[in-house]
Image: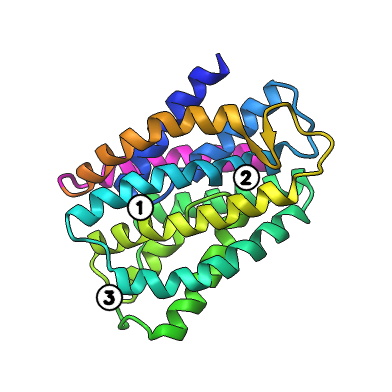
């Protein structure tokens, strides 16, 4: 039954990844927390396990999403390259930060972030394109901050990268596509860090590699890779305004649940 949940969760995450340039982590992490709680996993590690597993699944989600966006010529690879340098550094630091936070507190932090993202998406709050793309040091610094925060929240960084690039006058479809590309180094570096940090943890369930739970990883990856292409195609055909508001409502409920 749990594996079926992971398959459905992967399909939802894949569509979100392609459509909004997010890795689906804002949905994956809460659902995994609820699932792991129901399975009786130790409360001291289940939130870290959910975050680490979410980041590992985003690797697979990003690959197909980026391929589809690249095929349409929407990825700004020079921007990606310099942001990736900072992302790799920031993601490692973010993983260390998350590991140092106790599970219940980490859930509350994720809950607050989910509510903020919900308000941003639901009210369609976007920074106006008021500045040009920064130079190499600026892109690297931005990547470091985004990578650090993304590792803590278990996300691909789209909810941070897309607004940043839009503010820096990158057209929205290119911002979404470049954000999807940035999700890959975020996920890879962070997932590896969570594996290492949780390797000697004594309360992990069977079939875990550090803070990555393999059954959930496989189930989500199987469907997310296919549906990421579908979401990326929709991003170039549809106005996702209604979907964004529905997604925002879901995030609001999740965030409040984590806080309560």
Mark 3 against mark 2, which lies toward the viewer? 2
Q: Is mark 3 on a helix, strand or loop?
A: loop
**Occupied quadrant, residue 75:** bottom left
The rendered magenta stretch, by its main secondary structure, is classed as helix
For the record, the magenta segment spans: 237-260
Name above or below for residue 235 compared with residue 205: below
The earlier-in-sequence mark between 3 and 2 is: 2
Name above or below for residue 85 compared with residue 240: below
Residue 246, visible in the rendered structure: no
Please name the residue shown 29% across and 75% down the image. Answer: 129
Image quarter (top left, top right, bottom left or bottom right) of the N terminus: top right
Residue furthest out toward the right? 202
Q: Circle 2 is placed at which residue position?
A: 52
Residue 203, visible in the rendered structure: yes
Q: Circle 3 is placed at which residue position?
A: 169
Image quarter (top left, top right, bottom left or bottom right) of the C terminus: top right
The earlier-in-sequence mark between 2 and 1 is: 1
Q: Circle 1 is placed at which residue position?
A: 21
Mark 2 against mark 1, which lies toward the viewer? 2
Please name the residue shown 55% across and 42% down the image. Answer: 54
């Amino acid at each position: 039954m749990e594996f079926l949940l992971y398959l459905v969760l992967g399909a939802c995450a894949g569509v979100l990844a392609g459509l909004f340039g997010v890795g689906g982590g804002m949905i994956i992490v809460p659902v995994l927390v609820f699932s792991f709680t129901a399975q009786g996993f130790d409360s001291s590690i289940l939130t870290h396990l959910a975050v680490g597993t979410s980041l590992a699944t985003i690797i697979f989600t990003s690959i197909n999403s980026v391929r589809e966006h690249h095929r349409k010529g929407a990825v700004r690879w020079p921007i990606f390259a310099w942001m990736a340098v900072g992302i790799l550094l920031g993601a490692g630091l973010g993983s260390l930060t998350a590991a140092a936070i106790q599970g219940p507190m980490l859930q509350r932090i994720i809950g607050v972030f989910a509510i903020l993202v919900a308000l941003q998406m639901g009210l369609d709050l976007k920074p106006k394109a008021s500045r040009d793309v920064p130079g190499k040091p600026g892109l690297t610094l931005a990547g470091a901050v985004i990578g650090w925060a993304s590792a803590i929240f278990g996300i691909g960084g789209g909810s941070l990268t897309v607004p940043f690039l839009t503010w820096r006058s990158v057209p929205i479809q290119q911002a979404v596509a470049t954000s999807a590309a940035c999700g890959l180094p975020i996920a890879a570096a962070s997932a590896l860090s969570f594996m290492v940090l949780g390797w000697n943890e004594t309360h992990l369930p069977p079939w875990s590699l550090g803070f990555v739970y393999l059954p959930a990883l496989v189930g989500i990856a199987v469907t997310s890779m296919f549906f990421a292409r579908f979401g990326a195609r929709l991003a170039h055909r549809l106005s996702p305004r209604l979907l964004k508001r529905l997604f925002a409502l879901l995030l609001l409920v999740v965030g409040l649940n984590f806080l309560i």
